[in-house]
């Protein structure tokens, strides 16, 4: 009986120890599980924050790229902007009065975008069709301009420019509109030097061909306006800027 009693006590003690150990182990595992669960939640939060920061950085980068492209386009437009879009200068009193007087004398004159004075001679009156030779009416027109060059514009440099319409050369001896414009400009230049003693040092010839139309080349009227010789008086810089 004594032995059986001790055996029972020993069994009960082991059972109690086992129960206590299991309970402790379960508590430990639960605590570790909760810790890992919290760590996972913290990592998830950090990952979400990093993703949001990355998305913001990508958005800012795309915005910067778009702005850079926009600025590059603006710069390209500025680089390619033709000089003709520049606002024409406001004539000073001397240039304005000169233009008024030229117009009153029947001349087609205007101030260019760079401040010079241009007198327009229509080619249909100044030259024969497809020809570089001056007509009688053309000579009279150049005579009138020559008097101004020797008086009002004495000593100033003169550029004679030949302009054509947009029709390609087909039946005349000229290779193209560049040559036709150049030959007509040279005819006027030579006439000024040889018939009116305008100093050759003051004269220079240029051809614009069909590149600078003043009217639509789709109509006969527009083409007639584009066929012209312009005698451009180079206004001294200080006078052009005087206000």
Image (tube, rainbow, N blue to C red):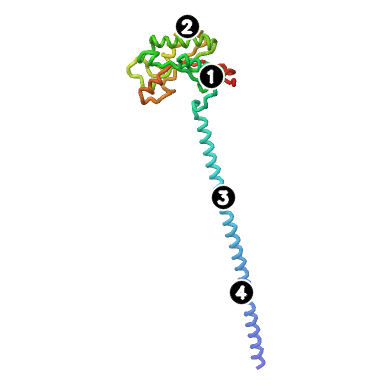
The residue to which callout 4 is attached is 26
| 81 to 151, vertically: above or below | below
Position of the C terminus by quadrant: top right
Q: How far across and how far down the image is residue 165, in percent?
A: 39, 21
Camera-nearest label, 1 or 3: 1
The residue to which callout 1 is attached is 96
Secondary structure under the numbered disc 1 in the rendered image: helix
Query: Decide: marks 2, 1 in contact (CB < 8 A)?
Result: no
For label 3, the crowd category at 10 Å Cα-Cα, with few meaning under 14, some 14 to 19 and many 20 or more, is few
Secondary structure under the numbered disc 4 in the rendered image: helix
Q: Quadrant of residue 164?
A: top left
Measured Cα–Cα span from mark 2 to mark 4: 121 Å
Measured Cα–Cα span from mark 1 to mark 3: 60 Å
Considering every residue shown, the one lying at the far left of the view is: 171
Considering every residue shown, the one lying at the far bottom of the view is: 1
The first of marks 4 and 1 along the sequence is 4
- Is residue 190 in view from this perspective? no
Secondary structure under the numbered disc 3 in the rendered image: helix
Task: Give the numbered dot on residue 56.
Answer: 3
The residue to which callout 2 is attached is 196
Camera-nearest label, 2 or 3: 2
Measured Cα–Cα span from mark 4 to mark 1: 105 Å
The first of marks 2 and 3 along the sequence is 3
Measured Cα–Cα span from mark 2 to mark 1: 26 Å
Measured Cα–Cα span from mark 2 to mark 3: 77 Å
């Amino acid at each position: 009986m004594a032995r059986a009693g001790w055996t029972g006590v020993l069994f009960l003690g082991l059972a109690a120890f086992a129960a206590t150990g299991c309970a402790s182990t379960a508590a430990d595992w639960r605590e570790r599980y909760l810790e890992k669960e919290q760590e996972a939640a913290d990592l998830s939060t950090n990952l979400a924050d990093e993703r949001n920061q990355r998305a913001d950085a990508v958005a800012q980068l795309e915005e910067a790229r778009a702005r850079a492209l926009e600025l590059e386009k603006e710069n390209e437009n500025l680089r390619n902007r033709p000089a003709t879009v520049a606002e024409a200068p406001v004539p000073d009193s001397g240039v304005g009065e000169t233009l008024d007087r030229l117009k009153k004398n029947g001349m087609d004159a205007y101030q260019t975008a760079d401040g010079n004075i241009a007198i327009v001679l229509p080619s249909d009156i100044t030259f024969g069709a497809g020809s570089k030779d001056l007509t009688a009416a053309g000579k009279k027109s150049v005579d009138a301009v020559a008097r101004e060059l020797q008086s009002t514009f004495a000593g100033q440099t003169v550029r004679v420019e030949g302009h054509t319409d947009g029709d390609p050369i087909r039946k005349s001896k000229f290779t193209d509109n560049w040559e036709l414009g150049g030959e007509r400009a040279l005819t006027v230049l030579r006439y000024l030097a040889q018939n009116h003693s305008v100093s050759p040092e003051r004269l220079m010839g240029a051809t614009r061909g069909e590149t600078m139309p003043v009217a639509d080349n789709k109509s006969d009227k527009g083409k007639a306006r584009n066929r012209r010789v312009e005698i451009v008086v180079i206004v001294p810089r200080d006078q052009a800027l005087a206000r």
